């Protein structure tokens, strides 16, 4: 443009800077800003607001606030741009300070202002600030739009105020997928998976067509409940919606089938994916590894390494977990070292947990203990020590078990499980005096074994039960039924062969 003898005006510059903001091209935006300053170009409110927006979206808040404070006559657009920058960082406190200044300068906030602040509150789970904005909307009789109301719902879910989220939803119009989607994802966030599925089907009954976000929000509920039939039904709706080419939706389907143990269905989805990213590769590796197909998991990992997808920290966790479940010790150690040396990934506690468990199951106890001792950041981790301690009991290594027990008791002297395992370890070694000492110490400290608890889902209700639990009103019938089933199992030829 300049080569043709034309100088850019305010509209041109605002458009170019806004393009930098959309592309998150901070360097190009800075160049334009610096050139304007060098050439003494007068920054009007439009250009300045565009610069604030660009710096805010690129995460350069120091520059954003510097430009913002130099604007002599701040419009609502410049205020909104600055608030939006803080909102992206989840800085609700700074958003509220700007909101207060707006009121002091008699600048009336718009719905964009309020939505940005609510989004900041949601990101930081700052309920107090969010409730203030909600109150401001109500007091001033502001007619909120769907984005403001959805931000309110999201805030209340993130802060655990489910009832308040439901109240906002009940009061708002429900004529598109946006409000329904935020409810589905909200229920998943708080672990209320049945309600997430319920609201999805209510949405269908209300005649609202689910979109890609609807499916990616509801499928994790199926994953968490291992509700395979529900997941298959939702898959049919995905096909009806012609979203089989949507990579995000297909990735959510893959994850659902994998977590529900439907490995063949997961593999079918995997092969249908137009592009396989690290998430889809990892989901499929996890599916194989979690369901007794470690060799297939490792084979797929080899294919992944030959593709354009680069394994990340979660991928290696899936690989190590597969090796641990299958007892593939050498392969697990190889991939653990490869993660560090070839990919430059620093192992986390979860990776060390797989490695310690792998070595412990194989009886390589001192090797596992050596890793703990050589690595200061994990040497006293309670979970890792407990994993190795259980392996000591499994392999009846009393000497090392006692050494680790001392470390565990030092870290948590009130944990009864350490004393119980140590007592059982002494009993298996027929060291009765030592066993009695441990039991006596438990009694002295008033420690008791926590009863084992399990649960089963029947007709969408979770029924918990404990060992020798007779609290259920029909306990007598339950135990009679169990006795009958046990009798049939004992007569069963397959069961007899497995005893």
Image (spheres, rainbow, N blue to C red):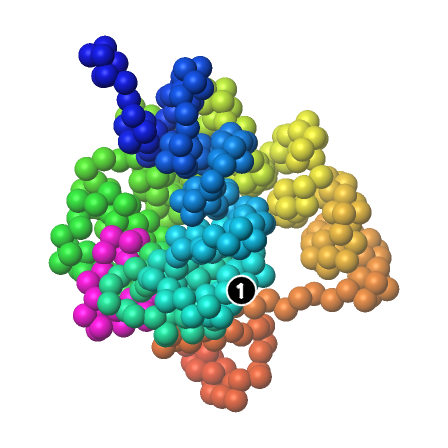
Residue 160 point in image, percent of width and height: 52, 64
Residue 3 point in image, percent of width and height: 23, 10
Viewer-side residue, 495 vs 377? 377
The magenta-colored residue range is 189-216
Residue at 56% across, 68% down:
453
Asked if 33 appears above or below 402 in the picture, the reply is above
Disc 1 marks which residue?
131
Residue 96 point in image, percent of width and height: 56, 52
- Residue 201 in magenta? yes
Picture quadrant of residue 421: bottom right
Residue at 44% across, 15% down:
38
Viewer-side residue, 463 vs 32? 32
- Residue 98 in magenta? no
- Quadrant showing the N terminus: top left
Residue at 39% across, 57% down:
111
Q: Residues within 10 Å of mark 1 (few under 14, many from 20)?
A: some
Q: Identify the main secondary structure in magenta.
A: helix
Asked if 446 appears above or below 26 in the picture, the reply is below
Asked if 389 appears above or below 465 in the picture, the reply is above
Residue 141 point in image, percent of width and height: 43, 70
Q: Note whether residue 76 is visible.
A: yes
Picture quadrant of residue 270: top left
Asked if 133 appears above or below 73 in the picture, the reply is below
Viewer-side residue, 119 vs 379? 119
Viewer-side residue, 465 vs 47? 47
Residue at 83% across, 63% down:
445
Q: Note whether residue 496 is visible.
A: no
Q: Is residue 263 left or right of residue 108?
A: left
Q: Is residue 225 left or right of residue 473?
A: left
**Label 1 element class:** helix
């Amino acid at each position: 443009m300049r080569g043709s003898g034309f100088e850019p005006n305010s509209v041109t510059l605002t458009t170019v800077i806004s393009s930098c903001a959309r592309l998150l091209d901070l360097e190009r935006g800075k160049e334009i800003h610096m050139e304007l300053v060098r050439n003494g170009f007068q920054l009007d409110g439009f250009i300045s607001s565009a610069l604030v927006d660009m710096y805010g979206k690129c995460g350069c808040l120091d520059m954003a606030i510097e430009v913002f404070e130099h604007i002599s006559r701040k419009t609502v657009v410049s205020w909104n741009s600055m608030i939006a920058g803080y909102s992206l960082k989840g800085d609700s406190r700074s958003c509220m300070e700007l909101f207060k200044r707006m009121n002091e300068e008699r600048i009336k906030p718009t719905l964009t202002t309020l939505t940005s602040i609510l989004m900041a509150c949601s990101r930081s789970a700052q309920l107090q600030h969010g409730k203030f904005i909600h109150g401001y909307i109500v007091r001033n009789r502001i007619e909120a739009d769907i984005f403001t109301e959805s931000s309110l719902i999201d805030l209340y879910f993130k802060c655990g105020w489910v009832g308040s989220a439901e109240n906002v939803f009940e009061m708002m119009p429900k004529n598109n997928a946006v409000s329904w989607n935020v409810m589905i994802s909200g229920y998943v966030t708080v672990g209320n998976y049945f309600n997430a599925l319920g609201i999805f089907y209510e949405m269908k009954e209300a005649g609202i067509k689910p979109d890609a976000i609807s499916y990616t929000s509801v499928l994790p509920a199926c994953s968490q409940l291992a509700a395979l039939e529900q997941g298959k039904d939702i898959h049919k709706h995905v096909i009806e919606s012609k979203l089989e080419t949507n990579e995000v939706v297909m990735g959510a389907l893959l994850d659902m089938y994998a977590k529900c143990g439907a490995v063949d269905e997961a593999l079918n989805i995997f092969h249908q994916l137009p592009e396989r990213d690290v998430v889809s590769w990892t989901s499929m590796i996890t599916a194989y590894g979690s369901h007794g197909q470690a060799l297939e998991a490792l084979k797929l990992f080899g294919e992944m390494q030959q593709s354009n997808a680069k394994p990340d920290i979660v991928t290696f966790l899936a690989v190590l977990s597969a090796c641990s479940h299958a007892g593939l010790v050498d392969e697990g150690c190889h991939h653990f070292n490869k993660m560090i040396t070839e990919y430059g990934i620093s192992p986390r506690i979860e990776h060390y947990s797989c490695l310690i468990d792998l070595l412990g199951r194989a009886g390589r106890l001192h090797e596992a203990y050596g890793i703990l001792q050589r690595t200061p950041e994990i040497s006293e981790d309670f979970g890792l020590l407990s994993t190795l301690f259980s392996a000591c009991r499994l392999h009846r290594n009393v000497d090392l078990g006692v050494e680790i027990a001392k470390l565990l008791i030092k870290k948590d002297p009130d944990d009864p499980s350490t004393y119980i395992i140590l007592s059982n370890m002494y009993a298996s070694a027929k060291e009765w005096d030592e066993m009695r000492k441990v039991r006596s110490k438990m009694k002295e400290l008033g420690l008791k074994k926590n009863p084992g608890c399990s649960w089963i889902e029947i007709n969408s209700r979770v029924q918990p039960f404990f060992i020798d639990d007779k609290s259920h009103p029909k306990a007598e019938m339950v135990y009679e039924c169990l006795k009958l089933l046990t009798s049939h199992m004992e007569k069963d030829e397959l069961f007899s062969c497995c005893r």
